[in-house]
């Protein structure tokens, strides 16, 4: 009744409602996304010059969490070429680089292991409106450099985003043909703040097959920080949801503060664990570690493989 009275009393409101009803779902989605981009653009222009924690600059346009804001903030502090690579993008509707593509018109390469996902990306308006290359390939440390080279991405790039829920550590370690200024890498918060561990390398690794809980994947933050240091990068923080770590190449670090893994670690609180039938179990805290503690990891400190429970102490 209230809505009817408002509409009846306001011809303009009635007109707007009629226009909304006349739009197709695709038109509505496009309009919503344009409004999100506009809001994100305004937020990017208001970012502070310096912060004590990356969580202070978080905002979300197309990223899963607050990573769009973090990326915009870091790119204001470095001199980076306008190009990016992101792999593990699924349909690219939710990603770390889509806002960068739309707002800043960067050239980009996205890779996903699903041909259906990549086919979906090629139907997006962004695919023809911008210089976006989409490649379907299951990523391994053996093929990653060839994938980049074949797509025309070599040398310095502005940003690299790594999220394949598995061999992230091993693939980043293998990358040689590009030198990104900023790297975003997913870490497994369940592995703790200091242990340097990763899943053992297997070219066909998938999170689902590794353990029914979906909790056994990727690498610890400590492992990624150690790898970053060897590759010439400094760790500058994590997002507030505790799944993405940020690294800046040392020659571009400037006034950004380098952190240790312990200083920048954020424990994730999202509850995505599953039982053997695929149902969500919503494990949290130490219960997640207990669920996979018996599984074998590569301990990078000792150079050996041993149960996770022994590696994390």
Image (cartoon, grey):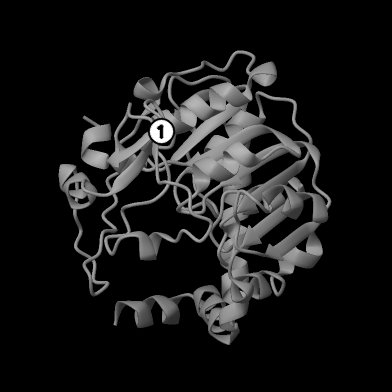
Instruction: Determine the residue located farthest toward the right in the rendered image.
Output: 152
Residue at the image position 52 percent from the left and 32 percent from the top: 246
Looking at the picture, tell me which residue is in the foreground, 83 or 104.
Answer: 83
Which residue is found at the position 75% from the left and 26% from the top? 79
**Residue 283 lies in quadrant:** bottom left
Residue behind mark 1: 221
Q: Position of residue 171 (x, y in %)?
A: 58, 45
Q: Where is residue 78 drawn, in percent x and y? A: 69, 25
Horizontally, residue 293 falls left or right of residue 221, namely left
Q: Residue furthest top?
A: 255
The quarter holding residue 127 reads bottom right
User: Which quadrant of the figure has residue 104?
Assistant: top right
Along the line of sight, which residue is nearer the eye, 218 or 263?
Answer: 218
Quadrant location of the C terminus? top left
Instruction: Check disc 1 and report its element: helix, strand or loop.
Output: helix
Instruction: Say if residue 48 shows up in the picture.
Output: no
Q: Is residue 187 above or below residue 125?
A: above
């Amino acid at each position: 009744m209230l809505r009817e009275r408002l509409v009846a009393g306001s011809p303009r409101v009635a007109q707007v409602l009629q226009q909304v009803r006349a739009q197709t779902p695709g038109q509505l989605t496009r309009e919503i996304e344009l409004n999100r981009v506009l809001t994100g653009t305004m937020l990017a222009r208001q970012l502070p010059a310096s912060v004590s924690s990356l969580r202070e600059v978080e905002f979300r346009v197309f990223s899963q969490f607050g990573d769009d804001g973090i990326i915009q903030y870091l790119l204001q502090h470095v001199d980076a070429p306008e190009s990016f690579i992101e792999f593990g993008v699924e349909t690219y509707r939710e990603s770390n680089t889509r806002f960068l593509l739309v707002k800043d018109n960067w050239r980009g390469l996205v890779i996903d292991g699903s041909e259906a996902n990549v086919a979906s990306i090629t139907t997006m308006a962004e695919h023809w409106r911008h210089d976006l290359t989409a490649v379907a390939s299951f990523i391994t440390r053996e093929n990653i450099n060839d994938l980049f080279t074949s797509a025309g991405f070599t040398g310095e790039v502005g940003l690299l985003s790594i999220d394949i829920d598995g061999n992230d550590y091993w693939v980043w370690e293998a990358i040689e043909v590009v030198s990104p200024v900023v790297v975003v890498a997913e870490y497994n918060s369940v592995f703790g703040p200091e242990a340097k561990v990763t899943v053992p390398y297997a070219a066909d690794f998938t999170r689902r097959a590794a353990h029914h809980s979906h909790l056994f994947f990727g690498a610890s933050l400590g492992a990624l920080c150690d790898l970053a240091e060897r590759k010439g990068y400094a760790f500058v923080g994590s997002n507030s949801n505790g799944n993405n770590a940020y690294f800046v190449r040392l020659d571009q670090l400037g006034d950004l503060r380098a952190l240790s893994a312990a200083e920048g670690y954020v424990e994730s609180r999202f509850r995505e664990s599953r039982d053997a039938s695929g149902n969500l179990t919503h494990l949290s805290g130490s219960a997640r570690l207990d669920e996979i503690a018996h599984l074998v990891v590569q301990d990078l400190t000792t150079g050996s493989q041993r149960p996770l429970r022994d590696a994390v102490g």
